Image: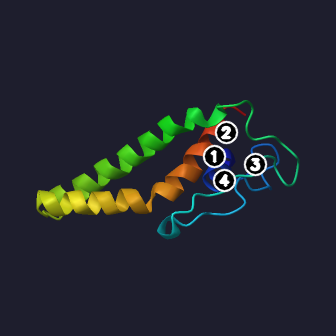
Amino acid sequence: MSKVIDALNCKCPNCQKGKIFMNGGNILLLNIPKMNDRCPECDYKFERETGFFFGAMFVSYALAAAQMITSLVVFWYFIDLSPLRVFGIIAVIAFLLSTINFKLSRSIWIYLFY
């Protein structure tokens, strides 16, 4: 369970102390999070090879799809909003969570191959 918590907190899979990202980014300023090349604590290299994080795109897709489906169920079936409002809410949620999805997908991808 500690590995799952460390992956969600974007900690180094090797030492569980260093951070994978040097900053969190800001979606409102259109800044994506900047990732460390190596762990600042143990010098573990995060990107194993060129294009290593291509697969993280699929993890990000799965996270976004789960968030959108959950939003659809909550706002359409339980709150009973109109389809147009639900679409707008889902679009806003997807936009606001994109930075978090970026960080989580890369962290999960690193942990899958550690």
Q: Which residue is mark 1?
A: 107
Q: Residues within 10 Å of mark 4 (few under 14, many from 20)?
A: many
What amino acid type should be assigned to the residue bearing mark 1? Ser
Q: Which residue is mark 3?
A: 12
Question: In the rendering, at what x and y percent does residue 106 appear?
Answer: 61, 44
Mark 2 and mark 4: Cα distance apart in space: 10 Å
Q: Are marks 2 and 1 in contact (CB under 8 Å)?
A: yes
What amino acid type should be assigned to the residue bearing mark 3? Cys
Residue 25 numbered mark, or none: none
Nearest to the observer: residue 39 or residue 28? 28
Q: Are marks 1 and 4 in contact (CB under 8 Å)?
A: yes
Q: Residue at x 64, y 48 (%)?
A: 7
Q: Residues within 10 Å of mark 2 (few under 14, many from 20)?
A: many
Q: Which residue is mark 4?
A: 10
Mark 1 and mark 3: Cα distance apart in space: 9 Å
What amino acid type should be assigned to the residue bearing mark 4? Cys
Secondary structure, mark 4, is: loop
Secondary structure, mark 2, is: helix
Q: Residues within 10 Å of mark 3 (few under 14, many from 20)?
A: many
What amino acid type should be assigned to the residue bearing mark 2? Ile
* Picture quadrant of residue 79: bottom left
52 horizontally vs 92: left or right: right
Secondary structure, mark 3, is: loop
Nearest to the observer: residue 9 or residue 96? 96
Q: Residue at x 82, y 48 (%)?
A: 15
Residue 110 numbered mark, or none: 2
Q: Is residue 31 visible?
A: yes
Question: In the rendering, at what x and y percent does residue 114 appear?
Answer: 73, 34
Mark 4 and mark 3: Cα distance apart in space: 7 Å
Q: Name the outermost residue toward the bottom.
A: 28
